[in-house]
Image (cartoon, grey):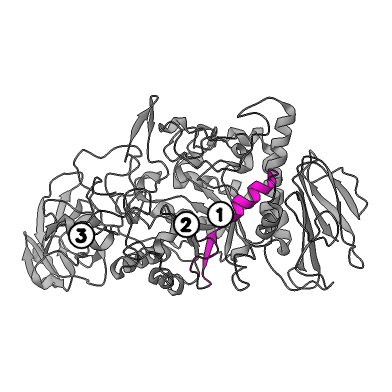
Amino acid sequence: MSYRAEGCENISQAPGATGEVGGFRIRPGLFRENGAVIVPGGVSFTISSCGADSCELCLFHRAACEPFAVLPFPEDCRIGHTYSMIVFGLDIREFEYAYRMDGPHDPARGLLFDRTEFLLDPYARAVTGQSVWGCRKEQGKAYHARVVQDSFDWSGFCDSKIPFQDMVIYETHVRGYTKHPSSGVKHGGTFAGLMEKLPYLLELGVNAVELMPIFEFDETADERIVDGRQLLNYWGYNTVCFFAPNTSYTAAVEYNREGTELKQLIREFNAHGIEVILDVVLNHTAEGDERGPFFSFKGIDNQIYYMLTPDGRYYNFSGVGNTLNCNHPVVRQFILDCLRHWVIEYRVDGFRFDLASILGRDENGSPLSKPPLLESLAFDPILGQVKLIAEAWDAGGLYQVGSFPSWNRWAEWNGKYRDDVRRFLKGDENTAAAAIERICGSQDLYPPDRRQNASVNFLTCHDGFTLYDLYAYNEKHNEANGWENTDGAWDNHSWNCGAEGETEAPEILALRERLRKNAFTVLLCSHGAAMFLSGDEFCNTQYGNNNAYCQDNEISWLDWSRLEQYRTFQQFVARLIAFRKEHPVLRGKTAPARCGWPDLSLHNGTAWNRETDPFTRQIGVLFAGRQKGGQKDDLVLLAVNAHWEPHRQELPEAPNGCGWRLKLHTFCEDSFQPDTPFDGKSMMIGPRSAAVFVAE
């Protein structure tokens, strides 16, 4: 297929042209198609601004700083607040584009129109000058957009459609996953490199990957040198363009075909039963506050796209300078268009919304009881089958875990699960009752009609300690970030087991491994979706850094040599994931058990004991239901002893024809082949250990 807009070699061959601007034949464009869209013989350019008086389309030769053509939108190419113009005779391989807008300039009222500034199209499908990781764009050079020709073939696409409670989510960073030399892939740090790890992911057993931000961002923003090391905005939570993939994550150059490699990844993963969830940052942009850059929304409709104080400054509920005015009708439509784009054009399976509580604030920052944006996303037909997962808090102090507006569609990162289970597993007092609630699906937080699709349970994520570090450090060690260890969370609920950081003490190493096994055992035996940080399964470390947002180096990159070092632990995790898949009662409520037992019951040390007190450190949770098909009961008991002394666990009498089998005991070196004496009725559980029993 030709890259040239079809059939248009010169302006005399412009089919349907009605006028001429700047030497180009033009006509009114596709007003309902935002962005740059290829049409027969030309390209339709459409952009809207409620406050601008006029708009110009600026065309650049590739990599040029100054335009070779400036095309003002004629009056017949403007309807209401929308400018739309088809320009004929363009070869999409040979140009880039931006806009300029003129209008009132009154910062105290939030009006920042400046006809000298080039503006990036908010609907751009590709951003130029971003394809080489870590390469800063020229000083003063504006962002330009590129026209993308989409010819990707989705025929035969297989959508996994995994039930929410069945998901085992693997959170990862595209670059960091394979950038380390030990990764063994051909295309390290790219979508292609991640695809090369598909066999590993299938072996591990996860069925969803959650990709940290892949929208186009500028990793060189706030670039610093600390102790001779270049620090970048590595995580990518500073979006430059919401419709464009990060081109520095591709192994191949994709001029005018941007997104192809990511689409290949999504198609390949879904074909093998692995869904792809995108971590989306719709709460703020890379333009920052009044001290930040000016390249898109500020010059289009600053007073609409951002929450502004009465004097025209920026509310900062995101913690990074500005806050998108998400519930304004214009911004709400933009966000809806964005998510629809990623579902239609990329077939993504779900979204995790960073600092999602911001999406529920009004233009003054006050929380709304029924936020229009969240309701629109919940009921949108295009988004009807994708997962919507909220990080149900923000940097302004709004914490909504258990109360995030849902319409029975929104799930939540369950931050209370993380904190309550972490505290219990390290032996804190007065934590058993809360841990039981979390393991049982957080029934205190979610009503019955939401429990199957509400909670994403996790103990680790990108933000905080890795699992290895959780049991190797009492304190965070973020000195390498250059802020004198003042950044990052202080309340980690971690424990170094007796030595800070690395040690050769065998008793400490054994205890740490047991605690890691306990953590995975509880996580994968809890009702709700399960999520863990990539590399946790082979004990990846960030050397105590719990806020590695700026570390594009060995601190953040997964060290795959640890897979061999901790192979037995990785195999333990893979077997746990397989065990979870074998037992539907561990994931959520099933049909009632034929034996008459309730779907959830407590056996805290002794059979049918529901009691806890501030000093309870031993719990037993029995999950009862039926296997798929409904003929055979599925009965699993999870027992956890968080005490530093062994304790006996008594089991209820098994139903007729069944007997209890010990399937796992983390106190044993081979946890899935435990050599612990067990008479079928009770067993001594080792100190700081977990055990799992199945009635067969």
| Left or right: 186 as drawn, with respect to 514 | left
| Whole-number angstrom distance, CA of label 1 to CA of label 2 | 9 Å
Q: Residue at x 27, y 58 (%)?
A: 308
| Left or right: 649 as drawn, with respect to 149 | right
Which disc number belongs to residue 415?
Answer: 1
Judge whether residue 423 is colored magenta.
Answer: yes
| Whole-number angstrom distance, CA of label 3 to CA of label 2 | 29 Å
Name the foreground residue: 511 vs 532: 511
Which disc number belongs to residue 393?
Answer: 2
Give percent across and percent down for residue 10.
11, 60
Judge whether residue 668 is colored magenta.
Answer: no
Q: Amino acid at mark 1?
A: Gly
Q: Is residue 621 above or below residue 290?
A: below
Q: Is disc 1 in contact with disc 2, using a CB cutoff of under 8 Å?
A: yes
Q: Residue at x 66, y 52 (%)?
A: 523
Q: Residues within 10 Å of mark 1 (few under 14, many from 20)?
A: many
Residue at which label 3 appears = 300
